[in-house]
Image (cartoon, grey):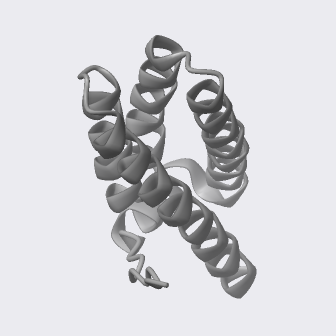
Amino acid sequence: MLKQNEVVRLNSNRLEELYSQLGEAGAENIVCRALEELAVRLSHTERYYSDGRLAEMRKSARSMVAIADQIGMHMLSRVAADVAACAGGSDLVATAATLSRLLRIGERSLSEVRDLQDVTN
C-alpha cells in the first residue's frame, strides 16, 4: 500500500499580518470562522463526489480557494483549485486522486493552524 505523506506548510507571515491588522480578537475571529468553513466545505466536497454531483463538488472546492489563502493555507488553496479543475473535466480518476489529496492536505492544514493558534495563545 502506498502511504501518502506530504508536508503541509502554512504561510505564517499571512497569519501575522492578520493579527497585526485586526488585533488578536479580530484575527482569532477570522481564523476560527475560516477553519470552521473550510471543514464544512471539505465535508461537502467529499459528499458531493460520493453522490456524483460533480458540479456542486467543483463549486465547493472553488469556494475553498479564497478562504484558505486568507489564512495562509496556500497548499490547500492550490489543491482545492486542482480539484475544481478536475471536477470540470471528464477524468474521474484524476478527480478522485485530487480529491483524496485535498482531504489529506485539508486535514493536516486544519490541524496545523489549530496547533499554531494553541502555541500563540
Q: Is residue 116 left or right of residue 8?
A: right
- Tell me what residue is drawn at x 69 percent, y 55 percent: 28
User: Is residue 70 depicted above or below 47 in this figure?
Assistant: below
User: Is residue 47 depicted above or below 82 in this figure?
Assistant: above
- Tell me what residue is drawn at x 33 percent, y 60 percent: 75
Q: Quadrant of the C terminus?
A: bottom right
- Tell me what residue is drawn at x 44 percent, y 12 percent: 55
Residue 70, percent from left and from top: 43, 45
Q: Is residue 18 left or right of residue 78?
A: right
- Tell me what residue is drawn at x 42 percent, y 23 percent: 58
Residue 91, percent from left and from top: 26, 32
Residue 96, percent from left and from top: 43, 45
User: Is residue 53 depicted above or below 2 in this figure?
Assistant: above
Residue lying at the far front in this picture: please name it.
1
Quarter-wise, where is residue 4 in the image? bottom left
User: Is residue 32 depicted above or below 112 in this figure?
Assistant: above
Count up the numbered dots: 0
Residue 86, percent from left and from top: 28, 33
